[in-house]
Amino acid sequence: MKLLYAVMYTAHSEFLGTGASYVDGKVMLKGLTEAEIAEFDGEINRVDHMGFNPTDDPEQEGLSTAELTYIIDQLAAQDPNETLGILSKSQGKWLKVNHPDFMDEITDEET
């Protein structure tokens, strides 16, 4: 069972159930399986099929971190729609750790 990440506007995310919301509560990011994705009745944007090249290695194909960030920033800038974006596990994990709008907030208790 392969886990992928799904990203969708919170306003239309009933399909995702509960999950982490980001970008000022506008976008939700949640892990899903291919079977769960197949149940979605709407437009799906397969960002995971673009690959991922987090080290910007010229010998490797796939989105750079700058390109992935650009895609997510453009998503957040648009009006909410019902499109489900699918990210690979590595793309989703990278966003959670490195994108300022997706990083877990550090509370005073953790510092």
Image (cartoon, grey):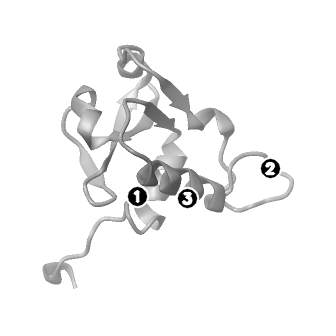
**Vertical arrangement, residue 41 with respect to residue 80, above or below:** above
Q: Which mark is residue 60?
A: 2
Residue that mark 3 sits on: 69
At x 36%, y 18%, the residue is 40
Q: CA distance from mark 3 to mark 1?
A: 11 Å
Assess whether mark 3 and mark 2 are in contact (beta carbons under 8 angstroms): no
Kind of residue sitting beneath label 1: Lys
Dot 2 or dot 3, earlier in sequence: 2
Query: Helix or strand or loop: what does disc 1 sit on?
Result: helix
Residue drawn at the location 46% of the way across and 57% of the way down: 95
Estimate the x, y position of residue 29 in percent, counting from the top left: 35, 45
| Secondary structure category for the residue under label 3 | helix
Judging depth in this view, the residue of 111 and 40 nearest the camera is: 40
Q: Quadrant of residue 67?
A: bottom right
* Image position, residue 91 (x, y; %): 53, 48
Q: Which residue is mark 1?
A: 96
Q: Amino acid at mark 2?
A: Gln
Q: Nearer the viewer, mark 2 or mark 3?
A: 3
Q: Secondary structure at mark 2?
A: loop
Outermost residue on the front side: it is 79
Residue at x 52%, y 52% (from the top left corner): 74
Residue 2 x, y percent position in the rendering: 46, 28
Report whether 63 appears left or right of 106. Answer: right
Determine the CA span between mark 2 and mark 3: 18 Å
Looking at the image, is 106 positioned above or below residue 68?
below
